[in-house]
Image (cartoon, rainbow, N blue to C red):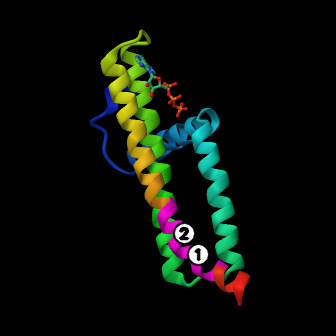
Amino acid sequence: MGLSDRNQRGFRRLLRSFVFAAHGLKHVIKYEQNMQIHLICSIVVFAVAWWLTLPLEHWLVLLLVIGGMFSLEIMNTAVERTVDLYTEEFHPLAKRAKDVAAAAVFVYGVFAVIIGILIFGPPFIQILFY
Ligand SMILES: Nc1ncnc2c1ncn2[C@@H]1O[C@H](COP(=O)(O)OP(=O)(O)OP(=O)(O)O)[C@@H](O)[C@H]1O
């Protein structure tokens, strides 16, 4: 959507916003190594969850955690690009903004790993020791 047709309403506008979101997603997947790592990890997680025939509640938690991780990584990229638009010179506030955005992904990642251990730990212990 051009900046001029911001006042447009209706289905066409909705459709175009999906197209722009798809462009953003394609950009993050193509250029962000961390996003590629998240994608590979999530495919492995879903494959193992399928193999273990985890219950629906566990699938729902996994979907929430992985969806949240993707969304945070995408927002982190948005912060990085916005900071780069403002300056590509070294600036303490640019560093602060990027580091804080990265910290959001890191904190969520730590909790995602804890949730993963809680979900996958018991069935693996069952398979390995019983
Ligand atoms: N303009 C800047 N001024 C000061 N420090 C910066 C600036 N740009 C980046 N940095 C520092 O370098 C780090 C890496 O920044 P960069 O833009 O390369 O993102 P990144 O962490 O490599 O992210 P990703 O790997 O997800 O692309 C930042 O977290 C920040 O500490």
Residue 75: give its label.
none
Q: Amino acid at mark 1?
A: Gly
SS majority, magenta: helix
In which quadrant of the rendered image does the C terminus lie? bottom right
The picture places residue 64, in percent across and down from the top left corner, at 45, 65
Q: Are marks 1 and 2 in contact (CB under 8 Å)?
A: yes
Q: Amino acid at mark 2?
A: Ile
Q: Residue at x 48, y 74 (%)?
A: 60
Residue under numbered circle 2: 117
Answer with left or right where residue 40 lies relative to residue 86. right
Q: Residues within 10 Å of mark 1 (few under 14, many from 20)?
A: few
Inspect the magenta stretch and tell me whether residue 122 lies in it. Answer: yes
Q: Residue at x 30, y 20 (%)?
A: 93
In the rendered view, tell whether residue 125 sits above or below residue 78: below
Visible in this render: residue 87? yes
Magenta extent: 113-124
Inspect the magenta stretch and tell me whether residue 13 lies in it. Answer: no
In which quadrant of the rendered image does the N terminus lie? top left
Q: Secondary structure at mark 1?
A: helix
The picture places residue 50, in percent across and down from the top left corner, at 68, 76
Answer with left or right where residue 67 lies relative to residue 48. left
In the rendered view, tell whether residue 35 sits above or below residue 4: below
Q: Residue at x 54, y 69 (%)?
A: 117
Q: Residue furthest top?
A: 89
For the image shown, how many numbered marks are present on the structure? 2
Q: Secondary structure at mark 2?
A: helix
Q: Residues within 10 Å of mark 2 (few under 14, many from 20)?
A: few
Q: Specify the quadrant of the image occupied by residue 87.
A: top left
The picture places residue 123, in percent across and down from the top left corner, at 63, 82
Residue 121: give its label.
1
